[in-house]
Amino acid sequence: MPWKLLLRNVLGHKVRALLTVLSVAVAVFLIVILQALTTGLSKTLDASASNRLLVQSAVSLFVDLPLGYQQKIAAVEGVEAICKFQWFGGRYEQEKGGYFAQFGIDPDTFAVSYPEVTIADGSYEAFARERTAAIVGRKTAEKYGWRIGQTVPIAGTIFTRTDGQPWQFTLRGIYESNSPAFGENELYFHYDYLRESLEQGGATGPEGVGVYMLRIADGADPIAVQRAVDELFENGPQRVQTTTEAEFNRQFITMLGDIPSLLRMIGGAVLFAIFFAVLNTMLLAGRERTRDLGVMKALGFKNGVAAVLLVGESLLLCLLGAGIAIGLAVAAEDGLASATATFIPGFELDRDTLLLAAGIAAAVGLASGLLPGLRAARLTTTQALQELA
């Protein structure tokens, strides 16, 4: 196999080779990210706890439930703990575009309901004791450089203070999560701090609770609990919809549409586009090297060598592009994970995704070089000279 000739062919048209490699790199990079997003969605849903249910309004997730529902739901057989979740929707004032998720919760039931969450710095007990305290995910704390004991100003967009000042939260804990279903980008504070501010006229905004989280007792049937809660408020005043955590997460993600199908369609379109681009490059290369192929065959090279040269060139270009794409994707992983954490906390570039990208690039390279390779194998010395005559 004349390896030097293979390299000479690749470098014979440097601009064309470079553009082909970059085209493959862009396409493979997109495929890697799309696949990682799809895998992250699956991981997020698969990691959802089987002993947690979410109760929301049957009308919409954006319609709050009455506070009085908590006591009635807690009395349902099989409910071990209940925790309020209220979307706050504020903005970190000292950072341009400082939007991230914040929730008002019940500190006394939150910790026992989410054992996958641990405090890496600070103290949960200190958070639970102090009404204006908050805990924040490690990734958000690192992003803004926050430290324990720091007071964080959050400007309300849904809940605004009547004095026009931002809400002040004192950080008492930085948490980490060992589950892809629970992200490390959120801030949690006392729901009662928000409720009391609204009741005392210190703030304005909707009253009620966005979602009730139910922790199911060991041995209890989640389906029976789900049915009992829904039937409890079947006649109002606000009907509810109780779902498993996995189903709730799925509905939250699909508010933007059928993301997995959309990602697969985009990935398929990108794959076909790059295949035809590389195929066109290799067809041109095969045409240009007709004389070289004829001379090689006249010197005694077998038909297989001529075919392997073109297939090898196509494969080399695609693998070079894949290598660049994988390197860029790995370098951008942290930034992409942070950007998608609100909807897809399970985003990760695992080995299977990277191997899939390399395999796709290799398949495109082989398929694109096959047609010109077969033509080169069938071409005789006489035909080669006649085509250029």
Image (cartoon, rainbow, N blue to C red):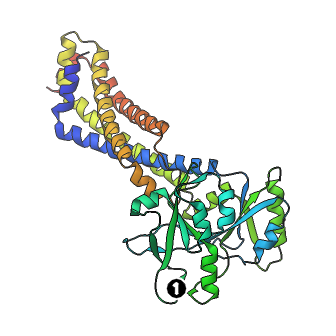
User: What residue does disc 1 label?
Assistant: 161
Left or right: 115, with 2 as reference point: right
Left or right: 128, with 122 as reference point: right
Q: Nearer the viewer, residue 128 or 339?
A: 128
Residue at image location 79% in from the left, 55% down from the top: 217
Left or right: 325, with 216 as reference point: left
Image quadrant where one finds the N terminus: top left
Left or right: 374, with 5 as reference point: right
Image quadrant where one finds the C terminus: top left
Work out whether 298 lies above or below 372.
above
Answer whether residue 239 is visible to the viewer in this image. no
Q: Residue furthest left?
A: 389
Position in image of residue 182 (x %, y %)? 58, 55
Position in image of residue 49 (x %, y %)? 68, 51
> Element at badge 1?
strand
Work out whether 73 lies above or below 309.
below
Position in image of residue 331 (x %, y %)? 35, 46
Q: Nearer the viewer, residue 302 or 169?
A: 169
